Image: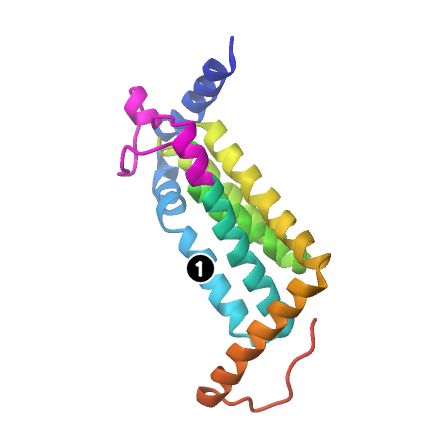
Amino acid sequence: MNFEQLDYQLFQIINHLGMTVSFLNPLMRFLAQQAEYGFYLGVVVYWFTRRELNRKMVAQALISACMGLLVSGLLGHFFYRDRPFVAHSVLQLINHPANASFPSDHAIGAFVIATSIWLFRRRDGILWLALALCIAFSRIWTGVHYPSDVMAGAMIGMVTAVGIHQFFNHSKGLQKVLRSSIGVYEKIEAKFWPRTQQRFNEL
């Protein structure tokens, strides 16, 4: 049995759960389609806590997400793979364009942000990583990705987040640029939303 056959068999096992435990399908649809917005909301909330550590975290998460999705675009172009519902008869629970299946952008986005949070805030990060795992699993359950698509996406997201974090940690120049950029933003922000108390220190 080759890798593609194993990947498809694992896909079938997970996708068929939509028939054997169908009461979970509404949850899986939500995770596959709407749960990603929780990450966007989380990024906004962390940013507007106005804490320096959180703003560094959000900035690195967004940079990492851009890099991860760039990698995804390149891989999808050079290693194009049809979606499961295009190549096979599957239980498809959500609508989706018949575009490149490999790697999963949802998995990349979820894991890159969750990992970035984990690098700064361990306890929070564990919860976000758990949500990212649920999103990745739901994309297989609902019939729009193979297991290898989401595993590759998760790996790209985590490696990109760690790589960007280490890159900033080992470059004083980049740290200075990041601090300066946040500082410029905060001066503009203060004109519309003055601080009413002393600036928080890093947690």
Give how far across and how far down residue 185 sits, in percent.
51, 77
Q: How many marks?
A: 1
136 on left or right of 16: right
At mark 1, the secondary structure is helix
Give how far across and how far down residue 18 sits, in percent.
36, 30
Instruction: Residue at 46% x, 16% y: name it.
Output: 4
Is residue 103 among what the camera can see?
no
* Along the line of sight, the residue nearer the viewer: 188 or 124: 188
Q: How was this image coloured?
A: rainbow
* Along the line of sight, the residue nearer the viewer: 107 or 171: 171
Say if 200 sits above or below 7 in the image. Answer: below
In the picture of the structure, the residue carrying the numbered disc 1 is 40
Give how far across and how far down residue 110 sits, in percent.
49, 48
Magenta portion: prevailing SS class: loop
Q: Quadrant of the C terminus?
A: bottom right
* Along the line of sight, the residue nearer the viewer: 83 or 23: 83
Is residue 46 among what the camera can see?
yes
* Along the line of sight, the residue nearer the viewer: 173 or 112: 173
Q: Range of the magenta residues?
A: 72-101
Residue 86, magenta (yes or no): yes
34 on left or right of 56: left
Residue 83, magenta (yes or no): yes
Say if 19 sits above or below 27 in the image. Answer: above
Say if 138 sits above or below 39 in the image. Answer: above
Give how far across and how far down residue 162 sits, in percent.
64, 48
Instruction: Residue at 53% x, 84% y: name it.
Output: 187
Instruction: Residue at 50% x, 69% y: name it.
Output: 45
Circle 1: is it few (<14), some (14-19), or many (20+) Cα within 10 Å? few
Q: Amino acid at mark 1?
A: Tyr
Instruction: Residue at 53% x, 42% y: name it.
Output: 133
**Residue at the limit of the structure toward the top, as seen here:** 1
